[in-house]
Image (cartoon, rainbow, N blue to C red):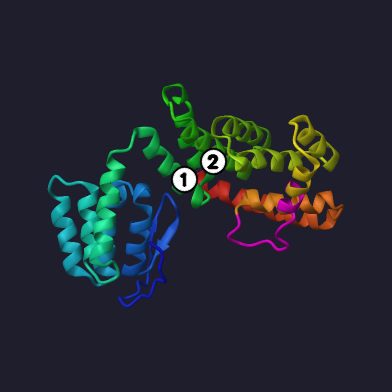
Amino acid sequence: MSKIIVCTSKKAENPFTFLNTKVEIYSYEELCFYIYNNTVLISKSSLSDKLFNWIRDELGMTALSDKLFAIANKAYHAQDLLIEILSAGDYIDADEIKEYMDAWQKYRKLSKPQKLKLKADGYLGYRRYIKAATIYDSIIDVADTITDREFLGNVYHNRGVAAASNFELEEAKEYFLKAHELNDNVTSLKGYFYIVAITSDTADLREEIRRMDLTEEYFEEIMMDIGDAKDDVSEMTIFAMLQRAVYNKMHKDINEYDRRMDIILSLLKDEFREQAI
């Protein structure tokens, strides 16, 4: 589901905040969009009196609030509350509700590691790197019980992204290499070389590429990837920002390298404070 959020309902003066992602919701439409796209991150504790009261007091949707309280007073699944919310207005149509219910049924049939990965991927998308890393680690802890090498490789790859974004660069290299060993994905191998570039100079990067029997053309491709974007973007992951900083470092633009690294370190400090709550 991807759509522009056109809000026709009352806008809340005080937002509802999903504490695990720090996302603030100001309208019924925003609430529906968040639920539809982040179900795996919505715990039963989020579906509480606090949310139901907010729907009544801030959105003026008394009937919906009363229904949610009634459902919560009986034996229920989180799905019951979420579908009730999605069905209360016109933002989500009947076909989308059916797709949502089908996706929920498919989710229930997944293995525990598959469910955990979806949750960790969600946190990774919201830059909750510590939360994501903890969940990926719980999957890696039972790696010997997982036979799907591609799936496990993807877990290691995303764990590498989380590590790199938390500036755990040596650990990130190991995760990316392990990921490539398992999934044979070129993206994982490139992730490894990006970290080599961050922690070394151009000569070391070239030598490491040669050591793995890769060509000079591959080295040039990595260098082009690193310097592909000229500007920092606020939505960019810290890992991607690091790649841009490396481009400056390798082109001897130390002032720009220092500037970007200062930004990255500041972001890391802010994110760590939020994630530590």
Amino acid type assigned to the residue bearing label 1 in the image: Asp
Residue range in magenta is 222-236
Reply yes or no: does residue 230 show up in magenta: yes
Number of callouts in the render? 2
Image quadrant containing the N terminus: bottom left
Instruction: Say what amino acid the circle numbered 2 marks.
Output: Asn
Q: Write the residue at 50% across / 36% down.
A: 155
Secondary structure found at label 1: helix
Q: Are marks 1 and 2 in contact (CB under 8 Å)?
A: yes
The local secondary structure at tag 2 comes to: helix
Name the residue that disc number 1 marks. 121
* Residue that numbered label 2 is attached to: 158
**In this image, 88 relative to 45: left or right?**
left
Q: Main secondary structure of the magenta part?
A: loop
State the CA–CA distance, disc 1 to disc 2: 8 Å
Residue 51 in picture, x, y percent from top left: 29, 58
Q: Is residue 111 left or right of residue 263?
A: left
Q: In the image, is residue 91 above or below residue 201?
A: below
Give the image location of residue 203, x and y in percent. 85, 39
Q: Quadrant of residue 255?
A: bottom right
Residue 20 in sight here: yes
Task: Report whether 61 appears left or right of 236.
Answer: left
